[in-house]
Image (cartoon, grey):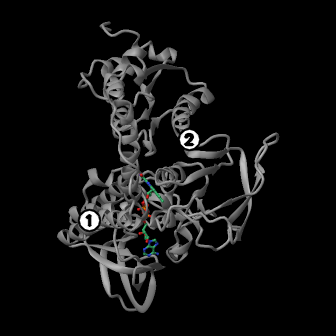
Amino acid sequence: GTVDLEADVVVLGGGPGGYSAAFRAADLGLKVVLVERYATLGGVCLNVGCIPSKALLHVAAVMDEVKHLEVAGIQFGAPQVNIDQLRGHKEKVIGKLTGGLVQMAKMRKVTVLRGYGQFVGSHHIEVQETTGTGQEKTGSKKVVQFKNAIIAAGSQAVHLPFMPKDERVVDSTGALDLKAVPKRMLILGGGIIGLEMGTVYSTLGARLDVVEMMDGLMQGADRDLVKVWQKMNAPRFDNIMVNTKTVGAEATPEGIKVTFAPAKDGVTVPEPQTYDLVLQAVGRTPNGKKIGAEAAGVAVTDRGFIDVDIQMRTNVPHIFAIGDIVGQPMLAHKAVHEAHVAAEVIAGELQGNKELAAAAFNARVIPSVAYTDPEVAWVGLTEDQAKAQGIKVKKGLFPWAASGRAIANGRDEGFTKLLFDDSPEAHGHGRILGGGIVGTHAGDMIGEIALAIEMGADTVDIGKTIHPHPTLGESIGMAAEVAHGSCTDVP
Ligand code: FAD
């Protein structure tokens, strides 16, 4: 057939994985075509994920923060919320970032091809032009011939089969649309995405229920971190239902009537409840089955993931995959790092540069953050995991009730916790294995713990590093000193 464009690398999908791969490959001198079906670059993260959620969470955090000033004798009136303007503000934030990406692509001479891409062979991808804000196909098609491909087609929200099609039932994308503030809202799935959106809606005035199949909210985080969040957030909720399944839902004039069932013996669940808004946040599913992978010989798992090696290579050596489509954790910072690996390996091979060609994804840890209020952040081994795996750890816990800055901020509910290897082989000088922070700005501080883990730091390295006073970040040094058992001891 005819070939319209040729590329050293075609990148399928313009999210954080895709644009990062395209930009790095172009910076390394390769001819790059980036295929994206939507009108803007940035994928889920910039358009309907990380960024818009944080724009709204910032607003919610400030609205909530001023209430903490009442103890200082400062009273604000009830906030006047203009929801259309708030939505507009969020759109502007997105526009700044996605517009920036267009400029960055231009500067690097990356060809952005707007359309729906599907492999039609091992070296060819067909792109059906799309238009509008969605993905309506225009009928016009282009075939790109590539030496290498990077699949970065991402994921989408899971929809429960029994949920009625109704505007009062939304996923995270619908929730970010922020049409109105409901009186009663159900968050289906007690993970980070659901709880972040719940925080926004509750600050704007909604009463929350949450239902979670597992035995606690925010799975993956240590239970003691979550406990602090839950205590502070209890007033937002009428019902926190754990070990509970949602088994049915019906659209009625009064609202969405949802039926619950125990997910475990001995659990009692409420009668069916009626909500003005139901947010489905029960996970995300990869887009692996929608890209014509079979035509290129790329293996896709039953669930739609694409398996890769540490160089991000699929079973087809010149085709790579990165980001949400290769598996958990589905996080933007993971996608970006994988993107750089794939681009570097390809550039190295095409240019005979052995060092680049040997690039690999070998991060020890990937941090997670719930941008709730307070924030919950963790990285590496958690205490629960250490217990379950029988790993002996030395714990350093620094309660923020002893932090001058946290007290001055009127927010001393949090703590910082570090875990060090305490196995006999470590001889009392074990390296840091993990850490967690719950408190305001926890997400901004967790990177230091990630760095300490990557560097193989021990209690002395962290404890003797002079942190500025008075800061919340100081609590990381203090936690290390607590683990070390002394503030003055020279090892
Ligand atoms: P995506 O961002 O999903 O991008 C894939 C792109 O490929 C999309 O633009 C899609 O249109 C395009 N595409 C797919 N198939 C085709 C095709 N056949 N042809 C053409 N184009 C195609 N992560 C964090 O790290 N921090 C956060 O705070 C955070 N908050 C989040 C909040 C919400 C509400 C959600 C939903 C997610 C959040 N995430 C967060 C997760 C983060 O958004 C994803 O991990 C990240 O976007 C994955 O990047 P990606 O490049 O793999 O895929």
- Give above or below for 472 relative to 3: above
Mark 2 falls on what kind of element? helix
Using the rendered view, name the quadrant where residue 17 is placed: bottom left
Residue 306 lies, in percent from the top left, at 53, 62
Residue 264 visible to an observer of this rendering = yes
Residue at point 43%, 83% (across, down): 126
Q: Quadrant of ligand 1?
A: bottom left
| Residue behind mark 2 | 235
- Give above or below for 300 relative to 193: below
- Give above or below for 217 relative to 271: above
Q: Amino acid at mark 1?
A: Lys
Residue 350 lies, in percent from the top left, at 28, 65
As drawn, the residue found furthest toward the right would be 266
Q: Residues within 10 Å of mark 1 (few under 14, many from 20)?
A: few
Using the rendered view, name the quadrant where residue 469 is placed: top left
> Given this view, does label 1 or label 2 mark the residue nearer the observer?
2
- Give above or below for 433 relative to 239: above
Q: How many marks?
A: 2
Residue 333 visible to an observer of this rendering = no
Q: Would residue 78 be found to the left or right of residue 463 on screen?
A: right
Mark 1 falls on what kind of element? helix
Q: Amino acid at mark 2?
A: Pro
| Residue behind mark 1 | 96
